[in-house]
Image: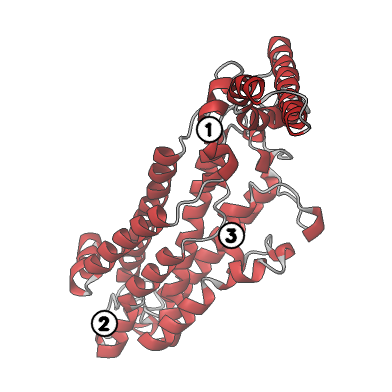
Amino acid sequence: MFLYEWKKLLFRRGGVWLILLFLVGEIAVTVLFLQPYDRVLESNREVYEGYLANVNGPLTQEKRDFLEAEMSRLNNIHMQLSQLNTSYYQGKISQEDYQAQLASLTEQDAHYTGFAKLYTQYIYVREVPERRYFLYTGGWEKLLNDLEPDYLLLLTLVLLLTPVFCEEYASRMDQLLLTQKRSAGGQVLWKAAAAGSLTVLLAGVAQICKVVAYGAAYGLPDGGYPLESLVSFGGSIKGLSILQGFLLQFALRELGYLYCAMLVLALSVLLKKFALTLMAGLIALPLPFLTLRTYYGLAPIPGPWALTIGSIYLVPSIEALGFTEMTPFQLGMYVLIVVGLMALLFGYVWWNNTNWAIKRISFGKGGGRQ
């Protein structure tokens, strides 16, 4: 039955074409709209990484001395270059002397911007040296700060899952199924399993596209370093490594998309009409994120905001918005509530596809079959 439901999703309802369009769109959007986390850093990355090779990892006294000495040297060169330009324009030195000194100083001063990026990172790391390490963070910052949902994935899920029950309601096949002793209740589990597995697969593919794109463009090195090494998570209380943070975020997002899939199935059973379910799904799924842009404090509320748990858990406290970072215990309770809501949605779908009148006839008062 599970494979049969998969075949219906992919072939009978044309799901395979929707999935192919989703893959093409996902790759195109990821590649075409790829933007660096820090444009200045990327334009000076070669110099930055040359210096980073000397300090990569945890902060030590030797690294402190190296960075302070190099900053002092580059500052002196920067000042000498400024003084040289001033002296030349004031006529204190000849053009020949100016050109001779300018080439040497300009070559060395060209390293200033790239090194300044590393020195800014040093100022950040030395505040909490035991939980912040030196590493190139551009790729990880992009990946972990991608807090928006995948709207293309949400659209694909609505289009794929709306017909699962609406097709039977449109053809009145549900009435025929409900005349059977086992009715349609036994098939609900397989329909939900097919929808859930397809959702997990598509969400995983979407995330892999981003990992490959960011990894190829910017790199994702040193995943074992503390999560607090990223500036965006400097106030984190999680005690996670960067890779652990990513995997946790990925798992929570999968749960959020599963919640969306179950919500679409429940809407299709409630509304029964394809057009109504499609409209309701397209409104209900993006609504949490559009709302959170204004009212971030609503994020911890389960229900329609369940999709956000893959994003809000890793975000440190934002005092200006009244948002407090979730603790592991709060996350656990939140996940339990979301799982409970998913169970209620599934129960609603199952109840409405089970012929309880026939079940009462089949199992009499004595407990045996009549």
Q: What is the distance, in whole Å, between disc 1 and disc 3 at their CAs?
A: 33 Å
Dot placed on the residue nearer the N-terminal end, 2 or 3: 2
Q: Are marks 2 and 3 in contact (CB under 8 Å)?
A: no
Please state which of residues 280 and 353 is positioned toward the viewer in this rendering. Answer: 280
Q: Residue at x 72, y 31 (%)?
A: 85
Residue 335: tell me if it is visible.
no
Q: If you read the primary sequence from the N terminus, does the residue marked by circle 1 or circle 3 appear first?
A: 1
Q: The residue tagged with tag 3: helix, strand or loop?
A: helix
Q: How many residues crowd mark 3 within 10 Å: few (<14), some (14–19), many (20+)?
A: many
User: Which residue appears at 56% of the width and 53% of the height?
Assistant: 310
Total marks in image: 3
Q: Amino acid at mark 1?
A: Arg
- Which of the two discs, 2 and 1, labels the residue nearer the N terminus? 1
Q: Which residue is mark 2?
A: 177
Local crowd at mark 2 within 10 Å, few (<14), some, or many (≥20)? some
Res 363 quadrant in image: bottom left
**Which residue, given by chain and number where applicable, does mark 1 sit on?**
45
User: Dot 1 surroundings within 10 Å: few (below 14), some, or many (20 or more)?
Assistant: some
